[in-house]
Image (cartoon, grey):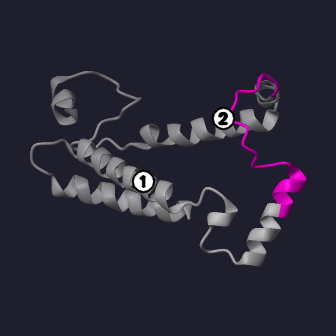
Amino acid sequence: MDFLAQVLSNLLMYGVAKAEPGGMAPWRVSYTITGCLCLGGGIFSYYSTPSTPQEAWFLSTAEKNSIMRRMEENREGGDKTGFSISQLKETVLDAKAWICLLFGVLYAFNGPVDTVRKPGYCHILMLQRFDSQLSSSCY
């Protein structure tokens, strides 16, 4: 599914760059569009995702009971709302947690590095020089 999101986002960026919307730089328009899409997706997910298996409208009664039994056996899904130092230590010392963090950082870092310098776009991390032409095209 990630490849589809990348293809669609690249097409969106290409369309925004070609349209040359008035008043805003194309990179600002693309960030505004993707920000609104992310915000909309987050709001939809917040209201459509069930809090417990019992509230899951898409599960049958047998599936709900099976999930609840498994959660009870694994002692998951409790009402513990406090902060636990032991869990913090466990997370800090867990190599998988650090790999996930590194993966997330590198995945997010990919976008600004790949930005192609086109009219209206600017290299965010690799600006070679600050001339007036570059400044006017980026802002």
Q: Which residues are magenta?
A: 69-86
**Residue sitting at 82 percent across and 69 percent down?**
66
Q: Position of residue 120 (x, y in %)?
A: 21, 42
Q: Quadrant of residue 85?
A: top right
Q: Residues within 10 Å of mark 2 (few under 14, many from 20)?
A: few
Q: Position of residue 10 (x, y in %)?
A: 38, 57
| Residue nearer the viewer, 137 or 34 | 34
**Residue sitting at 36 percent across and 44 percent down?**
116
- Secondary structure at badge 2 equals helix
Q: Position of residue 33 (x, y in %)?
A: 29, 52
**Residue 85 forms part of the magenta stretch:** yes
Question: What distance separates the C-alpha of mark 1 from that of mark 2?
Answer: 27 Å
Q: Which residue appears farthest toward the left when viewing the image?
A: 22
Q: Say which quadrant the C terminus sits in.
A: top left
Which residue corresponds to mark 2?
102
Amino acid under disc 2: Leu
Q: Which mark is residue 43?
A: 1
